[in-house]
Amino acid sequence: MNAIELLKNKGLKKTAQRIMLINILQKASIALTESDIKAEMGDLYDRITFYRTVQTLLDADIIHRIAVNNVIVKYALNALHIPKPEMNHAHFFCKNCHSVICIGDTPSVEYKLPEYFSVDECEILIKGICANCRNTKKLF
């Protein structure tokens, strides 16, 4: 599904920034930082518009945010293969190349919570060395 169809299905206006951001994330094989997206957007990038666009696309469940730590935040497009919100969706962060990869089909884990607590969502971040870095032996 292209960017215009995604926006139409969610009842959102087709702005140049929304279309471009979706297109950039669609062609990326890994999650991207704001800097990565800024480089791709070129002159169309405006920081305030970027954050408003990101928030709109997050609220519409078109994209998702991955907070690796207090410094690194990346964005990825929600695809048809990504599980429903009530299912686990994991991300893998490579400590060597800093790429973030969405991992689908993560086995469900049931956490025992104190009485009267309920789970709305769960973020799973697995940190290690990706296959590409391991194969090229470019470790640290």
Image (spheres, helix red, strand yellow):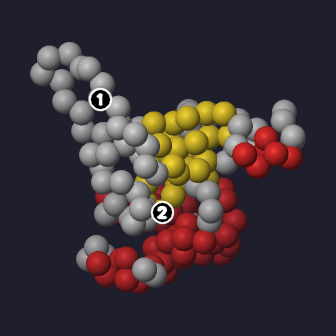
Q: Which residue is mark 2?
A: 77
| Image x and y of residue 50, in percent | 50, 63
Q: Kindly identify the amino acid type of the residue bearing the numbered disc 1.
A: Glu
SS type, badge 1: loop
The residue lying at 28 percent from left, 73 percent from top is: 10
Check the image and report above or below for 18 versus 35: below
Left or right: 88 with respect to 118?
right
Q: Residues within 10 Å of mark 1 (few under 14, many from 20)?
A: few
- Of the numbered discs 2 and 1, the one sitting upstream in the chain is 2
Which of the numbered marks, if any, corresponds to residue 110?
Answer: 1
| Direction from residue 89 to residue 46 in the image, left or right | right
- Of 89 and 69, nearer the camera is 89
Residue 61's tag is: none
Judged left or right of residue 100, residue 58 is: left
> What residue do we see at 67% from left, 48% from top?
99
The answer to the question of whether label 2 and label 1 lie on touching residues, with beta carbons closer than 8 A, is no
Observer able to see residue 14: no
